[in-house]
Image (spheres, grey):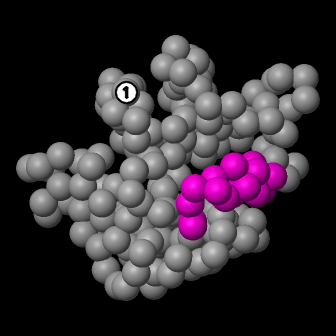
Amino acid sequence: MNIRRLDEERAHQIYLDHMVADFPEDELKPFDAIRKMMRGGIYEPLAFTDDEGELVGYAWQTVLPGCTNALIDYLAVVPRRRGGGTGTAMLHALAEYYADRLGALIIECEHPAEAPDPVVARRRIGFYLRAGARATAMESRVFGVKYQIYALLCGPDPGDEAINRDLKQIYRTMVPEPYYRGNVIFFGA
């Protein structure tokens, strides 16, 4: 599996060809916001391809300077490759890709108790746990949606305190005031 960092043009094409179908409209940032973060040097969209160069999936991260942990903002496997271990392989490759820069990749999973489809939410959490992620002592509520926070280690475990600190900083950077206040809330660690 190969990983390639995307430029704006290729990221926009994947956004149009895949992301609008892979994610609900209310979960998908406008591409202009993504472009702004890319230009600010804090957003890293990555494409995963097979040995023939065919797209098998993508993972887009928010990576802030000075933070030892980053947020997986979007992760998806193309439909024809789902269910065969590609997602797990992508997560392992992603952790290796960031091993020299990060302690962990932060993963947000919708809390099953409040998810529209609790079965899907539990299945998603199970996927991340089977791939090697660990639960943290944190939860969040972002624009009314409750999340459990997980960490996929890239190196030595940075601990929940560092993960919580960095996740708060990431959200402060991604969500400007006045939208942050009252809409982004953290619990635990």
Q: Nearer the viewer, residue 155 or 175?
A: 155
Q: Is residue 91 left or right of residue 160?
A: right
Q: Is residue 188 left or right of residue 93?
A: left
Q: Is residue 86 left or right of residue 6?
A: right
Residue at 87% x, 49% y: name it.
84
Q: Nearer the viewer, residue 102 or 163?
A: 102
Q: Can residue 152 be found in the magenta stretch?
A: no
Question: x and y percent of residue 140 in the render?
Answer: 34, 70
Residue at 41% x, 60% y: name it.
67
Q: Can residue 97 be found in the magenta stretch?
A: yes
- What residue span does the magenta drawing correspond to? 88-105
> Residue furthest toward the left?
178
Q: Is residue 36 above or below residue 140?
A: above
Number of callouts in the render? 1
Disc 1 crowd rating (10 Å Cα; few below 14, some 14-19, many 20+) is few
Q: Is residue 118 above or below residue 171?
A: below
Q: Is residue 87 above or below residue 189?
A: above
Query: Which quarter of the rendering shows the N terminus?
Result: top right
Question: x and y percent of residue 91 in the render?
Answer: 71, 55
Residue 86 visible? The answer is yes
Residue 112 visible? The answer is no
Image-quadrant location for residue 32: top left
Question: x and y percent of residue 128 in the render?
Answer: 67, 65
Q: Is residue 124 above or below residue 46?
A: below
Residue at 54% x, 21% y: name it.
7
Q: Which residue is denoted by mark 1 in the rendering?
A: 39
Query: Which quarter of the rendering shows the C terminus?
Result: bottom left
Residue at 55% x, 35% y: name it.
45
Question: x and y percent of residue 137 in the render?
Answer: 45, 84
Q: Amino acid at mark 1?
A: Arg
Mark 1 secondary-structure assignment:
helix
Q: Is residue 99 left or right of residue 41?
A: right
